[in-house]
Amino acid sequence: MKIAVTGDVHLTSQDEHPERYNALGNILEQMISEEIKTIIIAGDLFDANCQNYSEFDGLCTQRKYNSIVFYIIPGNHDNHLRGAHLAAKNVKVITEPEIILLGSPEVKFLFMPYAKDRTMGDNIAPFKSDLDPGHWVLIGHGNFIGGIRELNPYEPGTYMPLTRKDIELYKPGKTLLGHIHKNMDQEIVHCIGSPCGLNINETGYRRFLVLDTDSLSVTGKTVDTDYLYFDESLIVLPMANEVDYIRSKMNAAIKRWDVSDDEKSKIRARIHFRGYTSNLKTLKQTIHESLAGISFYNDEEPNLSEVSIYDDPERIEIANRVSEWINELEWIQRPDQPNKDDILVQALKTILEV
Amino acid sequence: MGVRIKKIKVKSLGPIKEFSEEMGLFNLIYSGNELGKTWLVEFIIASLFRNRKRWELREIGKSGKIWIQGLESELVSFSPSSRKKIEDYWESSGKGLPTAIVNLLVAKGAESAIADVEGGIDKYLIKKLLSSKDILDNIDKKISKTVQAATIEGQEIIGAERGEIKERDDLRKDLKQLDLIFDEIDSHYSGGLRQALAIEKDKFKSELSKLDEAKRYKAYTIDKKLQSLNEELNKISEDEINSISTDMSVYSEQLAEYGQKEDNLREVKNRCKHYEWLASARDVYQAFISHEAVKPDKWLLIAPIVSGILTLVFIIANQPAGGIIAFMATVFFLLIHIRKLDKAAVNAAINEEIKKLKREFKDRVGQELTDLAVLGEILERNKADYEKARILADQLSSEKVKLNAKLSTIMQRFRNLLGRDVDIKDWDETIRNFRQQLKTINKQIQSYTVELGGLGVDSSDYSEEDNGIEYSKKEYEDVQSKLNAVTQDIDKEHEKLNELKARICQVTGDELTVNWESLIENLQKKYDTLINDFKKNSAQIIGNIAVHQVIEELREEEDSKILEGLESDVVQKPLHDITGRYNKITLSEDIMTVSDGFNDFALSDMSTGAIEQIMLALRIGFSSKLLKKESLFLILDDAFQHSDWRHRETLVDRLVALAKTGWQILYLSMDDHIKGLFDKAGEAFGGEYKSIVIENS
């Protein structure tokens, strides 16, 4: 049996953020087309200030969706959510850690709603004897601190953390976590990611997960969202043919986004340029030409505040030669190492800053 | 056709209010101090050339233009705001850096400073003039020797452990340290483990509590058993048993004694069983023997005979008295003898009886009754026994009473103990059983007491409630041991966690009271800072390695370009034109040599004046070569200011010679002597000589 899993929808109201409802609606539509009858929402279905649940109730009770069963755990943003807040009969809000049997054959799902000042391990421990190692699923809302050192830029802080030790100790067959809006997939642990970009930090295509209870395998499905956010940082250099150079850089970035032509209108981009140009006006013009048909996030213009004008041909030549050298350098991009752009920026400082 | 500055026009340029002049072939622009000469030079540079930064020009106004002839068919105007500069009219050579044309075409007293160059002139000087050595050097000197010597192999920076590389390694170590801390957080922060241990602890505590209840219940039950045993024990008084046993012993002894006495009595009685017969026999015998027909003793027969003989003797002897006495004795003896015979005849029947008596006597006593004395003696003996038997009988009778009383007492005591009669034959066994029972009870009491003591439960804690669990010390100790172990594990986990927290606080600078969530966030921030520093440091090092290596490549290319230039005719030709003597210049192993066709001269050995001429020639030659023009313009900003007067004359002469080859000379000066030299030399150029004075406006 297949079960859809999402989280961090952060619903407010249709008027304020229709795109979030649309994203959830798209998940439900995909479920219907794939005949998936159960959806789990791993916390933060509602935004912190949202008290109006009637629109979500209305969505759940729509005739086409009323055969879908919703299992919802409160997250840190909607920790106040209770079953009584929702009238829809096909919605179950799980406010305390609870094992629910789902699927056929039945699999134990341990639902772990967000609890302040607790770790997930704290809450799993009482169920240990009921959990068959490797054959149960943890649905939680919190941080996975196993192997992750970086701050969550969207939500710094540690919320009901799950550690690798907990995974070793309790051996869930699969762990699906809400809270971290960025997708993350490890063998056992998956951060579902938000199904709809809430802001420019949540870039690219969004997804929801489909869990097959037979094999406990997880598949990501793209959500058809209203917007696709992209946040790019590009280096510019006053090359001999600067216009072509900028254009090629922009095209490479757009290619990286991997957005089809008919979805380009969904793009909301923020682009931050660093480096040097011989002509700022030409640079701006080239950027705009390259981004024709693409909207900017919050109507922000490309950020050129870190681009300096430079007209020293000798130093520019050195910079170009260094740029080529760096491009040819066999350097594998790793999270703990600078990328080639970072290296180039530092090299440019040495070359161009007098 | 050469390239020449046709006209310069400026307005409000520093102290210069207005300047508008057509330029000739040979030009001197003169101004007093602070009257705008430098402003004008900078205006020319800013208008014509790129790379204003090289000169660190002040902010030049946009009001002004310079017209250049020879670039296009028409005059081309340049201003500081022009996007197109004079460099745009020449393609790059493709090797090394684009030549800083401004370096070649504008001389700002550079040649005069030759003598100050550390380490001599030669290659350095040429590079300074003809290449971008200064730029390369200035960039390169920003890069530490450590990084310059470093290389990149795979993803690793290989270099000496100092400076930035050491900093990077230190950062990497710090990051590794944080990685370990994160791993430790992953291992020890797990609430799951602690919670699991806590649950286990609760389970053991609960088990222990139940076992404790069971123990208290067990203590209670043991206590009850002890009470019961003690009660039982109290019922079976050991003293009583001992007393009974003593009584039994006494009774037994007395009984034995009694039996002995009985035996004795029997024996004594046996011994004196004929007493009464003997006593009777004695009397009879005594009576019989007095009547016994005893034949007169022979002496009674002999005595009368003797006494008769004696009588006769006396008579014969006429001893009447003797005869009489003898006679009388004879008579007496005869009488006795007769009496005796008479009696014997009378008591013959008695004798028979005596015989019978004697036979009986023998039968009873086993010895012959010889006389009364025998009988008397035996009788006496029997009498003693008889008396003894009587006494014994009396005693036995008395003891029998006592024995019966004792027996009765013992029986009663058994009855009291057992509630039933105990046959005398069962006494010992009963006592043994009692004793065994006592022993068993005592043993049980002792065992229970030890067990109760072992439980260590105060009597006030006894529990009457049975929770259905059987207390087992082993199980209790086992659970206690597990509880201790899990408590230790929890303590260790807390200890590790606290120790870990302390270490993290050391890293983050947080107080120990900070909560874990904030601490982890701060550690992540610290990690972010460190990783960013590490990445930045790495990027700087790699970027600088890249820059240094490119600079090295460029230096080689520049060297190659210079060598190539020095060997070209277009560079060699002005050498002779300007120096009037040398026709060849070579650079070998950083030593520059000029030749006049006969001799070679090391540049370092030459006079400053000669060097200045050579450098001027090279400036001209390289300009022509790189810009592919036979003649261009040369702007000299008081380039000879520091030369002595004799050199100045020579240099001006060379400029004249150069101008005659088509090169346009613009000399800006505030030196009256130089102005004089130019004015004099300019006469040869007629209308092509412009001596312009910037007036005080």
Image (cartoon, coloured by chain):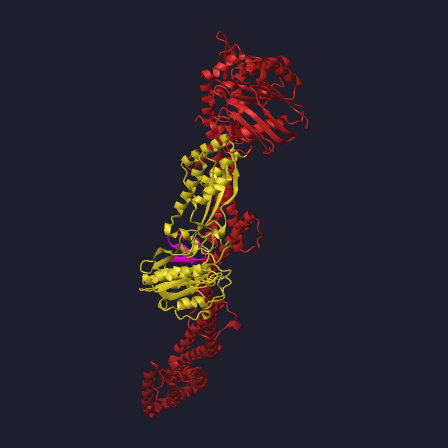
Chain colours: A yellow, B red
* Coordinates of residue B629 in the picture (x, y in percent): 47, 21
* Coordinates of residue B397 in the picture (x, y in percent): 44, 86
Of residues B255 and B26, the one drawn nearer to the viewer in this rendering: B26
B393 part of magenta stretch: no
Q: Which residues are magenta?
A: A167-189
Of residues A210 and A95, the one drawn nearer to the viewer in this rendering: A210
Of residues B405 and B47, the one drawn nearer to the viewer in this rendering: B47
Q: Hey, which residue is sitting farthest top in the picture?
A: B598
Q: Is residue B676 left or right of residue A239?
A: right
* Coordinates of residue A230 in the picture (x, y in percent): 44, 49
Asked whether residue B391 is in view, the answer is: no
Image vertical order of residue B362 relative to residue B487, above or below = below
Of residues B35 and B54, the one drawn nearer to the viewer in this rendering: B35
Q: Quadrant of the N terminus of chain A?
A: bottom left
- The image quadrant of residue B696 is top right
Image vertical order of residue B102 relative to residue A79, above or below = above
- The image quadrant of residue B372 is bottom left
Number of callouts: 0
Image vertical order of residue B507 relative to residue B192, above or below = above
Q: Quadrant of the C terminus of chain A?
A: top right
Q: Is residue A2 left or right of residue A327?
A: left
Q: Is residue A275 left or right of residue B354?
A: right
- The image quadrant of residue B214 is bottom left
Asked whether residue B44 is in view, the answer is: yes
* Coordinates of residue B38 in the picture (x, y in percent): 62, 27
Image vertical order of residue A38 relative to residue B248, above or below = above
